[in-house]
Image (cartoon, rainbow, N blue to C red):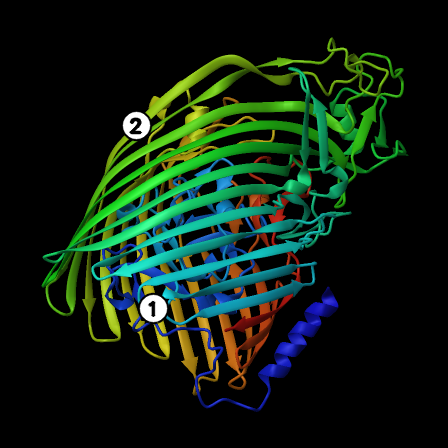
Amino acid sequence: MKKKSIFLIAATAVLYFNKAYAQETPQDSVKVSSIDQVVITGNSNPKKKIESSTAISTFSAKEIQKQNPISAAALLQRVPGFAVETSGGEVGNNLFARGIPSAGAYEFVQVQEDGLPVFEDGALQFANADNFFRVDNSVSRLEALRGGSGSIYANNSPGGLINFITREGTNDFRGTAKLETSTYGLIRTDLNIGGALVKDKLFFNIGGFYRSDDGIRKTGFKANNGGQIRMNLKYVFDKGYVKVYYKKLDDRNTFFLPIPLTQDGDKLKGFNGFDPNYGTYSYRAISQLNIPQAGGGFFSRNLEDGIHPKVDVLGAEFKYDLGGNFSVINKTRYTNIDMNYTGIFPAGAPKNAAKFAQDLGMTNYQYSLVSSGAVVNPEYVQKLGFWAIDKKMNNFMNDLQFNYKFDKGNVTAGFYKSNWKSHQYWNWSNILTTATDRPELLNLVDPSLSPSSTGYSKTYNGVTDMSTLLRDSQIQGSLNDLYLNVDYNVTDALSFNGGIRYSRDYYRGYKVNTTTANLNNSGLTVDGTHGFNTTTADDNMNVLGNQFTYWYYDINKVSYTLASNYKINRENAVYARFSHGFRSPNEEAYYNNIGKLDLVKPVLTNQLEVGYKYYSRTFDIAVIPFYSALKNLSFTDVYSDGTSENKFANTTNLGVEIEGYARLFNNIFEVTFNGTIQNPKYKDFTGRNADGSTFNYDGNVVRRIPKFYFNIAPAVNITKEWRAYVSMNYYGKRFQDEGNTDDNILPSFTEFGAGMSYQLGKIRFAVDGTNIFNTIGITEGDPRSQTVSGSNIRMARPIMGAAARASITLDF
């Protein structure tokens, strides 16, 4: 891998110093000029970017192609104000908008496709919004809005809106085909075609991808395998249009979690026996789980299925000119999701093998490999959670919007209705393995006892705790929202925007109560001979009961925003915006406080932002200072033993976002950049822990979110056809938890990428390298376990190691 990385860097350097410079805009230029760009997200009507009083970043299909992101999260790293953790793999990643802390996922932003949510709540347990969305060539552009009017046009989105806008057909038949491979066994094909079935009337577009790869981290199986297809049909008539569309996603992705590292001063290094760049506990040798259940039957799971959503989406969009400057647009969508989620979650850090046995009360102990029975003497062992979650989800949503245009502006009024449901079943177990990448299952027995003695074994085929946690629960949401937005142009240069949204939303659900049991009297055997009294693995197995606990919660809130934009001239503008919004309690907050929901409150947000924008043909810059204050923010981590606890806090954040682009030296040199400087802190965060101890985090820095991070990507257009680039992503120091202790610091890191492309007519050849210097970059610690006292072992989740991809793209 190092040789491949060196080759990639050398190739980039050769291209950089090539003497054949272009004198015209290259075909492969990375940026579309912003000066005439029109945006629709967070606005009542399409308007030029410079005239929009919002903080919004845009990426055309061409720009997305040049960046060739490995995941949706990797693309969103290019948006200022979004601190993104990409170490989970292709899916299951986390995004923090403008310093708003959360347990993860996309809790305070809404991910949309064509203006409607991918799923209404993007932060349900184990259902991150990016599990149900993939970036491919059927995406026309991305618009990413921070703060501002997000709360007026969508629910639970005070941090912003992420809107992926899909391609539609035109009168010209066009298509794109792409073939991609990599250093980690990738084979991926993308295809998108669109055109007119009836000129000027009936248009179609069909696109999608299929992909299979081994994963950058070495799992021993196909880490990612599957694809999606999107299709739409649009009919245009004199006074409007009607569009119908369908999406099918069936994809399997391995989810990567923390691994052990060692702390050496202010740096984290590889743990003995573990490659920090390519190692993982998610490995084929421990991928099969098959355990008897106290209620009868067996529970089986295959880690190789990973996160496996099956998503079906059917939608329609209708627009009609009513006359008299009135128009109506209606968007409707039904989404059905059937997802199996299987992942390996470390239950704390590795332990010395002797200490692990002694903590179980064993004076005599013996480890052996489950695979062969061979007796082994590992230095360290690892307890791992084998977490299995099944989720069945559906969502019907409809957005009806009326618009009236007048000489000085327009008025938009709408009603949004969304009904959604998520039913989930959890069955978690713990297993015992070697503390190495490519781990092996271990059995642990007391050799001083006979195999027929009670308590002889602490494991059952490597399982230490069978069905340690079961959950059967459901949550439903019924959202009924009215909204109004007004744009008024005082002059050609000065405009005002105001919006209000009234939310009357209802949430309800239930959980099935559980009890415990064991298999001692089941008649089953652990090895064909001995009963389950010989092992402790089945002690305190969770069993679902026949009693239900129901809960109900409603929201009655108003969100509003007020803004002004002043266009100094064609290229310069300033704006200011104040907004008030909220986020409904998250799913775990309901579950964890099911008998005391009066303690659970919506998160309230107040945000103020001002901004300066300059857009020209060759240079863009946006500088946006912002301030935010949040109340009633809940923290609901689920720990490795299945318990969770709720803490509530207020936060404040003062920061500035910077975003820019420059094309210099007669289009030879280009650079895109974005950065965020902020100071997110807890306020009034005191209380009592679950164990009765007290805490005081008032004034501490918000966990997992850096004060400073930026991305810069210079590129050289060596000729009209040849292009080379380097990217640098800096992620500042963070704290793993709220306590801000020295042993929970996550060091800053810098990740470099590089690549080159060649445009031969309509064929594009490209090579893209990620983390080319094999940096050990930690995006997060382990929120499910704390630091090992008196040890330099740290559990953390690093970014992926160095990798390269090569692709051929044909436009036709």
Dot 1 amino acid type: Lys
User: Which residue lies most toward the top here?
Assistant: 521
User: Which residue lies most toward the front here?
Assistant: 198
Cα distance in 3D space between marks 2 and 1: 49 Å
Relative to 596, residue 655 above or below: below
The residue closer to the viewer here, 398 or 471, is 398
Q: Can residue 738 be seen in this view?
A: no
Q: Where is residue 154 in the image (x, y as percent from the top left)?
A: 31, 45
Q: Which mark is residue 554?
A: 2
Helix, strand or loop status at disc 1 = loop
Q: Quadrant of residue 258?
A: top right
Q: Which mark is residue 199?
A: 1
Dot 2 amino acid type: Asp
Q: Is residue 15 left or right of residue 739?
A: right
Could you classify mark 1 by the number of other residues whose Cα lies within 10 Å: few (under 14), some (14-19), or many (20 or more)?
A: few
**Contact check, label 2 and label 1, Cβ < 8 Å:** no
Helix, strand or loop status at disc 2 = strand
Q: Where is residue 663 in the image (x, y as percent from the top left)?
A: 42, 80
Residue at (66, 28) in percent of width and height: 429
The residue closer to the viewer here, 474 or 520, is 474
Residue at (35, 59) in percent of width and height: 656
Q: Where is residue 547 in the image (x, y as percent from the top left)?
A: 49, 12
Could you classify mark 2 by the number of other residues whose Cα lies within 10 Å: few (under 14), some (14-19), or many (20 or more)?
A: some
